[in-house]
Amino acid sequence: MKTRHVLVLGAGGNVSRHSVPKLVAKGHNVSALVRNPDHAERLIDDGATVIVRDLTSLDEEGWARLLTPFDVVVWSAGAGGGSAERTYAVDRDAAMGMIDALEDLGEFAPFLVMVSYAGASEATTEDDGGAWYAYVESKKAVDKRLLASELAYQILGPTRLTDDAAEGITVLDGALDADSETPRELVAEVIVESVGRGETFNRNPIDFEGGNGAVAEI
């Protein structure tokens, strides 16, 4: 497997808690971007180089400078609830800014691994002005933007996340089960597989849940 220079955005999150050390263990050179410097020590211990920066503060030039050195970028960032305003700023606007920069980089753009959720591009929910509605609308907008682009990317669509241990994967096709669950550790394993390949899977987006299949065979 080729060693890649990987930028993980949102490296302080619960999926990245698994993905960063797994990427390092595979021999990749990992830079981990976080907004909160309190996460830095753990990430350094995991073997990553830490970048402390707020994604919402980056302009077009800032995004280009950030992305250019890397072979692969993993978007695992998110506002994590809270206010609708913060959710739109991170999950929609910052992600769109990143996509703009990738398109401007053209043939020099790194491969993008976008962590989304199963069915995001078609999801709807009641408009109550809250953070969940903002999240659903933001992820839908970003996924649709990617699907209409000519970028090199892979969208990952796990179902409801849990902290269970990863045992295997089932790739989903068609209607989603409301009770479906996906361990965060499994999402990390799919991220690592996607980074290692550096190209799209047979499905894009790929929706999945915990199961018995081998990640290497998806």
Image (cartoon, rainbow, N blue to C red):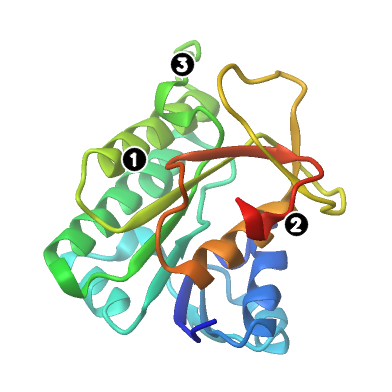
How many residues crowd around disc 1 within 10 Å: few (fewer than 14), some, or many (20 or more)? many
SS type, badge 1: helix
Q: Distance between the Cα atoms at labels 2 and 1?
A: 24 Å
Residue 18 found in image quarter: bottom right
Local packing at callout 3 (Cα closer than 10 Å; few below 14, some 14-19, many 20+) is few
Which residue position is annotated with label 2?
Answer: 185
At mark 2, the secondary structure is helix
Residue highlighted by disc 3: 124
Mark 3 vs mark 1: which is more N-terminal?
3
How many circles with numbers are drawn on the protein? Answer: 3
Q: Can residue 213 be seen in the rendering of this structure?
A: yes
Q: State the SS at label 3.
A: loop
Q: From the viewer's perspective, tell me whether residue 10 is left or right of residue 150.
A: right
From this view, report whether residue 180 is shown above or below residue 48. Answer: above
User: Which residue lies under the disc numbered 1?
Assistant: 142
Amino acid tagged 2: Glu
